[in-house]
Image (cartoon, rainbow, N blue to C red):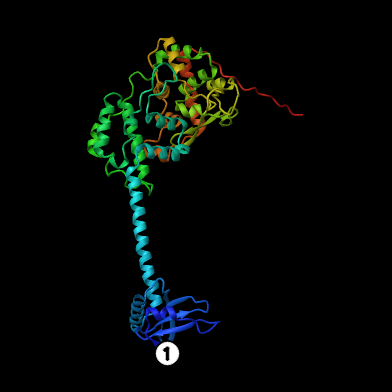
Amino acid sequence: MAKVKFTAGRIAEFTATSQTIPSFFWDSGAPGLGLRVTPAGAKSYIFQAKLNGKVIRITIGTPDAWDLSAAQSEARRLKVIIDKGEDPRQVRADELQAKQTVRDQHAAKKVAIEKQTARESMTLSEVWEIYLKERKSKWSDGHYDDHILFAAVGGQDKKRGKGKTIPGPLAALLPVRMVDLTSERIASWLELEAQTRPTAANSSYRKLRALIRWCEDKPEYQGIVPDNAYSARKVRDVLPKPKTKEGDSLQREQLPAWFEAVRKIPNPVVSAYLQALLMTGARREEMAALRWVDTDFQWKSITIRDKVEGTRTIPLTPYLASLLSNLPRRNEWVFSAPGADAGRVTEPRYTHETALKMAGLPHLSIHGLRRSFGTLCEWVEMPAGISAQIMGHKPSAIAEKHYRRRPLDLLRVWHEKIEAWILEQAGIEFVPAQPVLRVVTAA
């Protein structure tokens, strides 16, 4: 293999000696450096050497991209690698991999920083929207609507009456970044809200607490809220205690006036709905969502959606059965309202308030009817566990929780007893329809 001293002039003059295969010229100044010239005249610097008894050839580059001195330096560098017993190609691959790893690390770090920046910029409003969307299918309509109401920004025209709606208790926190929801921030917000609407403030706090706990169960939100944000002593010290409204329960002597006014409500569906709440102690949404398919007139039971257990079955007492049997079957809902978006009763408060005014009775909330049932049950000395099971209260004792699940017929004995007592106190004469008995004679 003849060698010549490469110069810029000679590089330019070299031509292929064959019309079919490339020609190779070798430099005497840099070991292993060669010039490959194709029959078409294309030129490129190469490096050739032996490694472990085998010839390896590496392309350096074209003379246009590499001047002679640079090509010679590269050949010497490759020769040093060969002398170490290493393959320059593998060394190059390792270098490229190392560089790619560094680039990947930088890219990953950049993505992590961007994600962290995005996390830290998320406001309560943004997370609240995601939270509600995910949890909606697991909540009752009323529970979901409460979340919407408590976070409403206000300023909208009232659907009833004049004026604008006011912001919900949580509205003040909606623009706040999640990372800024410190215990100091929450305590300051609670203290301000508690001055004008303590009950709503307490309920809003519990909804906010549930959202923060939900965040801790989601990898993408874990750690986004500062530790101890809702449980710090400074927060608990200003948390208003929920109070039962005084008088938010019907007294025994108020039953005649209440029934007289409610039974005169022009809409029979709303009238029956309000009486059903008092006669069962069910939550407003539980009773509103009652369907005909869950109402069994033959075996005298109704199955309603339970806030705690999912569903619960309670007796269909005689008076309540008579109310329901006379309602129109316009859709799947027992308490139907074709004009409403949901197709059923959703907002009976205004009708109830009108009836209360006509009866000269003090304010009584819809939830107060549930409270009234629980209170009136004591007049007939109904066992607390039975009234709790009918109303869907969570068992409060170990025995009640694990060993006391009373059958429907036992509930019916007491449920019919309280219904008859309430009707008696209200001055309503009601005689349950007697089943028709047929005597079958032998042939």
Total residue callouts:
1
Residue 246 is situated, as x and y percent measured from the top left of the image, at 33, 19
Residue at screen point 40% across, 71% down:
65
Label 1, on which residue? 2
Residue 52 found in image quarter: bottom left
Q: Quadrant of the N terminus?
A: bottom left
Find residue 421 and report its horizontal and vertical position in percent: 46, 18
Q: Residue furthest right?
A: 443
Is residue 63 in view? Answer: yes
Left or right: where 383 falls relative to 412: left
Q: Secondary structure at mark 1?
A: loop
Residue 88 placed where, x, y %? 38, 78
Q: Nearer the viewer, residue 409 or 81?
A: 81
Q: Quadrant of residue 366?
A: top left
Q: Residue furthest bottom?
A: 1
Residue drawn where x is 38% and y is 73% of the image = 66
State the residue in front, 262 or 56.
Answer: 56
Residue situated in front as seen by the camera: 151 or 270: 151
Assign the C terminus to one quadrant of the image: top right
As drawn, 392 above or below 57:
above
Q: Report the amino acid beneath label 1.
A: Ala
Please provide percent x and percent y for residue 242. Answer: 31, 28
Dot 1 crowding, Cα within 10 Å, few <14, some 14–19, many 20+? few
Inspect this view and state whether residue 58 appears. no
